Image: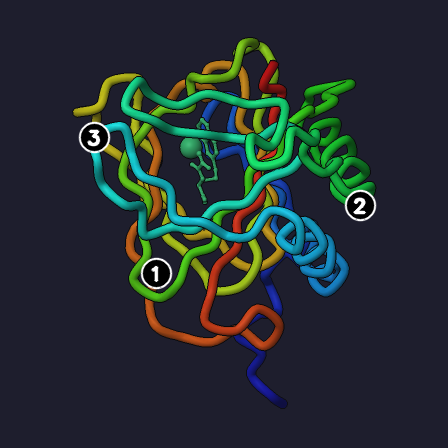
Amino acid sequence: MTLDLFEDATPPPWRETIAPGAVVLHGFVHEQGAELLAAVQSVVAEVPWRHMTTPGGYTMSVAMSWCGHGWNSDNHGYRYTQRNPRNGHPWPPIPAILMALVEEAAQQAGFARFVPDACLMNRYDVGSKLSLHQDKDEHDFGAPIVSVSLGLPAVFQFGGLQRGDPAQRIPLAHGDVVVWGGPARLRFHGILPIKAGSHSLVGPHRINITLRKAL
Ligand code: MD3
Ligand code: FE
C-alpha cells in the first residue's frame, strides 16, 4: 500500500472563511492559469508594468498595470483615473474572463451581483513586498474586493482596523481567489517578501489581480 499524505485533504475548490467577510476559494482558478495570464498580457501590452512612486517618495518594489479604471499616485495621495493621461483614451476594458470569474467568486462568497469597474494588477518579483496598508480610495466600501493569485506563492498579512493590530499570516497559492468584503473590507493587509522560485507558467513572479468597484 502506498502512503498518500494527501488522501484526507479536501480537493480544490475548497472554501475557507478566514475572518468575517473574508473568504478564500482555494484553487478556484487553478485550471484557468494560462487563459488568465493571456488576459493579463493583453492588458499589459497597452498599459506596461510600472513601478509607482508612493506619496511618501518611495519607489514600490511591486510593478502595476490596470484596466477598467486606472490608478495614480502623486504627492497628494492615490486616486482612480478614467483616462490615460498619455493619450486621453479610456483605459482598456476588463477582460471578459475576469468579469465572469469574479461574478461567480463573489456569489460563492455571499456577495450577489458584484460588478467591478476597475482591475489593478500587481507583479511581484523575488523579494518584492507590499507593506501593510488599507484600501480606502474606492467610493463604495459596501462592495467587496476580489483577488486572484497567480504564480509564486506568497504570505499574506491580514491585520485589523488599526495599523498596530496583530496580523495573521495566510499563505496564498497559484489559483487561489479571495473575496474581501463586509467587516474585512477596511482591514490592514500586506504581502511579505516573495521567496525565490520559479512557477511553471508565470516564471519567477507572482501576479495578483484585484477587481474592485472604484467609482
Ligand atoms: C483585504 N494586493 O492591490 S490582494 C492591493 O496580493 C493589495 O497583491 C495584495 O493589497 C496582493 O491593494 C493583496 C488581497 C486583498 C486586496 C484588498 C483587500 C486583501 C484585502 C482589502 C481589504 C482587506
Ligand atoms: Fe490592498
The residue beneath circle 1 is 194
Q: Residue at x 50, y 30 (%)?
A: 71
Question: Can I make out residue 195 in this image?
Answer: yes
Q: Is residue 18 above or below residue 175?
A: above
In this figure, which residue is indicated by the disc labeled 2? 97
Q: CA distance from mark 1 to mark 3?
A: 23 Å
Marks 1 and 3 in Cβ contact (< 8 Å):
no
Tag 1, which secondary structure?
Answer: loop
| Most foreground residue, 25 or 211 | 211
Looking at the rendered structure, the kind of residue marked 3 is Gly
State left or right for residue 122 relative to residue 187: right
User: Of the residues under marks 3 and 2, which one precedes in the sequence?
Assistant: 3
Ligand 2 lies in which image quarter?
Answer: top left
Q: Name the kind of residue labelled 1 in the image.
A: Ile
Question: According to the image, label 3 marks what residue?
Answer: 56
Spatial distance from mark 1 to mark 2, Cα to Cα? 27 Å
| Distance Cα–Cα, label 3 vs label 2 | 36 Å
**Residue ranking furthest to the front:** 87
Q: Front-most of 180 and 34? A: 34
User: SS at mark 3?
Assistant: loop
**x and y percent of residue 90 in the render?**
70, 29
Q: Are marks 3 and 2 in contact (CB under 8 Å)?
A: no
* Residue type for callout 2: Ile
Q: Residue 195: x percent and y percent?
A: 33, 66
> x, y (%) of residue 103?
77, 31
Q: Is label 3 within 8 A of ligand 1 (CB to nearest ligand atom)?
A: no
Residue 24 appears in the rendering? no
* Mark found first going from the N terminus, 1 or 2: 2
Characterize the local packing of mark 1: few (<14), some (14-19) or many (20 or more) Cα atoms within 10 angstroms. Answer: many
